[in-house]
Amino acid sequence: MKKEKSSATIGNLIKYYKPYLGIFFADMFFALLSACAALIIPLVIRYVTGTLIHESSDVILSKLPWIAGFLLLIIVIDCYSKFFIGNYGHVMGAKIEYDMRSQIFDHMQKLSFSFYDDAKVGQLMSRITTDLFEITELLHHGPENVILSVLKICGALVILMSINVYLSLAAFAILPVMFVFAFFCNRKMRSTFRKNRERIAEINGQIEDNLSGIRVVKSFANEDVENGKFKVGNDNFLSSKKENYKYLGAFQAGVGAFTTLIQVSVIITGCYLIAVKGMDLNDLITFLLYIGVFTEPIRTLVDFTEQFQNGFTGFERFREIMDTEPDITDSEGAVPLSDVKGEIEFDNVSFKYHDGNENVLQNVSLHVDAGEYIALVGSSGAGKSTLCSLIPRFYDVTEGTIKIDGKDIKDVTLKSLRDHIGVVQQDVYLFAGTVMENISYGRPGASKEEIIEAAKSANAHDFIMSLPDGYDTDIGQRGIKLSGGQKQRLSIARVFLQNPPILIFDEATSALDNESEKVVQESLEKLAKNRTAFVIAHRLTTIKNAERILVLTEDGIAESGTHDELMELGGVYEKLYNMH
């Protein structure tokens, strides 16, 4: 993806305020009130110290209640303004974060397998959590900090000029140098903040990988190996943080020194003006009060710089995901697939992965009748799983076409296509939750009776009822509390509930023991009855009864026929079978 220009990125960032313009402008209004309060109080102090104290006792006593009441009103207004900014402003930021998280999560659902082939879950998690928090902190605090700071600086400038032009010039002479210094530091910091984001995403990916495979780690007693791998990532992160803080420290120290230098310059110039030109001491005191009002927002802008860099680099990473176009989408004019019989045709199909140079499948042509039971066998890497993955368009063919009931699968909607295809994989994925929730994933909204019927069809009902809470039993992350055979039967129950006319069994029994395999095999054959079924088999004994067996090699479909026909042929299949 080409990097967006900063102006375009900021333009995209500002768009997220649109649904909340009312609260945004209210937030800015109260930021304005708070800035005015900060500017008014030194003026009142100047009036008291410069004018009121020279009046008679009666005048002072008569005006003091009014001044105290006015100051109290200013304090109340400032207090509520800061409450509104801290409360409703943060809620606005949280809502924007909610919108952005929903948007990126929805977009990730649309990205195809090829994207996730190269992505790491932990790094994607970092974009949805840490990055988004930094972005919304910027979107909330950024405008109000800038508004408050600019108003205070501009207001203080006007008042300072009205107090004494010479003192103002002494203060302002340092500003251009400070801004040039800040500009160059900012350029350095931006690259280091982005590097930090990438490094913390790598650490998140490493943690996710480790925790997901913690049982493998412990089974090999490889805790020290994992600690070593983590240390490398953690050291890299610390290194980038050190570089980041070097520039940030230089920036904060430099700006702090410049702001102190402004005060020193004013004091020295003021002493000179008192000695030479007879300037009123009260003007110097008031000026120094306003210098505090003037330099405080500059310090706020220093803190904002770090927040801006964090949020801005986070948003750039957010846009990288959002600007990644799904490579598999509904074509223009795609229609829903309906009344599916299950006839499938591969017409001269070739396929290679986007980062590969050689075709995984080459000129494959195949016709499968509706309701036919097809078994795919062959050595590892021959393209069995790839061929089946092309049917539901997990990947798109590089050349050729695939048709279902005579319709090109690229001309039908993805949802309707996948609704009619059930997939049972070797590596079963169950979600954290109950048994019922996992089975109902096959058809959300199904009744409890339908779910139980699907479980019975998958030979799962009996073992489910033996669980502590039956269908309401929590099965743990990825179904860790269940055996391999139990997990597989739940995945088959999901497909029974889905009730698709086309099935794909991707080595669904290869990881099971003999007893579990027998039960699961029985469930699969029951599920496959009267449906078009593709079975990728590792154990060839499980597909002896297939209506047709296809033998895939690197050159395509090398042999086709029943078990008996292929054994008589004495070719690749016979060698594979005897080997097993």
Image (spheres, rainbow, N blue to C red):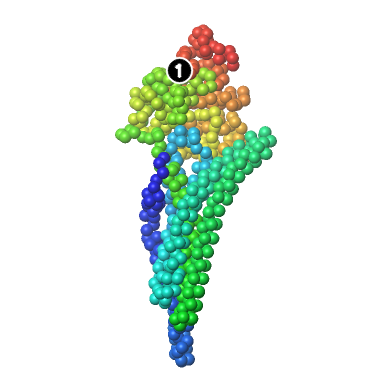
Q: Position of residue 378 (x, y in %)?
A: 52, 18
Please state the horizontal and vertical placement of residue 423, each as a whole percent of the image: 48, 29
Report x, y in % for residue 159.
Answer: 41, 74
Of the pair 377 and 223, the residue shown nearer to us: 223
Q: Nearer the viewer, residue 299 or 233?
A: 299
- Can you tell which quarter of the image residue 538 is in? top right
Instruction: Name the residue at the left extreme.
Output: 333
Q: Is residue 296 left or right of residue 6?
A: right
Crowdedness of circle 1 by 10 Å Cα count: few (<14), some, many (20+)?
A: some
Count all numbered tags in the image, as a single digit: 1
In the rendered image, the quadrant that contains the C terminus is top right
Above or below, 423 relative to 73: above
Disc 1 secondary structure class: strand
**Considering only vertical position in the picture, is 368 above or below 108?**
above
Mark 1: amino acid: Gly
Q: Position of residue 49 (x, y in %)?
A: 47, 83
- Residue 32 seen in the figure: no
Residue 232 seen in the figure: yes
Residue at 39% from the left image edge and 47% from the top image edge: 5
Left or right of 409, for residue 227: right
**Residue 85 vs residue 479: left or right?**
left
Q: What is the quadrant of the N terminus in the image?
A: top left
Q: Is residue 311 above or below residue 568?
A: below
Q: Residue furthest right?
A: 221
Nearer to me, 429 or 279: 279
Residue 230 lies, with reference to residue 351, above or below; the image says below
The foreground one among 450 and 205 is 205
Q: Which residue is mark 1?
A: 556
Tell me what residue is drawn at x 50 percent, y 52 percent: 189
User: What residue is at 46 percent from the left and 17 percent from the top?
Assistant: 555
